[in-house]
Amino acid sequence: MITVHTDGGARGNPGPAAIGVVINHPTEGKTTFGTYLGYTTNNIAEYTAVIEALRHLISHYKNDDVIFFLDSELVQKQLSGAYRIKDPKLKLLARRVFALLDQWTGSYSFVHIPREKNTEADEIVNTVLDREIA
């Protein structure tokens, strides 16, 4: 089972934003990365983190099962179907997530976790933002 921790953040909301991704594969080990997004919102950054994690997963591990851990309850609930997506920009991003999931052959789930259980992904976000906006 692959575990993926994602985080997205914007300083100012909207403001300078970045993502952080931590992928733990049971045999391949850990992969981490972060990307600066420019000026956007926290929610768009959170969705973008899931999208970028999925792109990486699809190119490396198509047949495995995966659990995504997110500290954004909104995004987790929207992707799990518990909340309706009203914002047009978030609807578009959710469609991208589901289009990528259509390429995934393993099972997947989205789990909400407290922020303090997502520190590594959060640290990546802050490191990228510190580097880009310093």
Image (cartoon, rainbow, N blue to C red):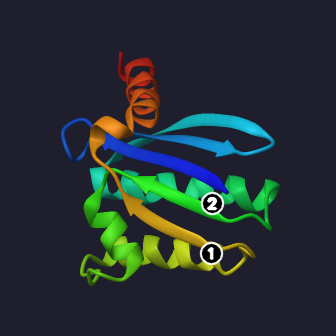
Query: Residue furthest toward the top?
Result: 134
Residue 50 on image: x %, y %: 51, 58
Which residue does the image show at 64% across and 74% down from the upper left?
A: 107
Label 2 crowding class (10 Å Cα cut-off): few <14, some 14-19, many 20+? Answer: many
Which residue does the image show at 49% across and 46% down from the upper left?
A: 5
Q: Which residue is mark 1?
A: 101
SS at circle 1 = helix
Residue 128 on image: x %, y %: 46, 27
Q: Is residue 30 depicted above or below 54 in this figure? A: above
Q: Is residue 89 visible?
A: no
In which image quadrant can residue 88 be found?
A: bottom left
Q: Which residue is mark 2?
A: 54
Disc 2 and disc 1 in contact, CB within 8 angstroms: yes
Q: Amino acid at mark 1?
A: Leu
Q: Is residue 15 depicted above or below 127 in this figure? A: below
Direction from residue 133 to residue 103 in the image, left or right: right
SS at circle 2 = helix
Q: Amino acid at mark 2?
A: Leu
Split into 4 quadrants, where in the image is the C terminus? Answer: top left
Label 1 crowding class (10 Å Cα cut-off): few <14, some 14-19, many 20+? Answer: some
Query: Residue furthest toward the left?
Result: 12
Direction from residue 84 to residue 130 in the image, left or right: right
Q: How far apart, in angstroms, are the residues tagged by discs 2 and 1?
A: 8 Å
Which of pointers 2 and 1 lies earlier in the amino acid sequence? Answer: 2
The residue nearer to you, when weighing 20 against 129, is 20
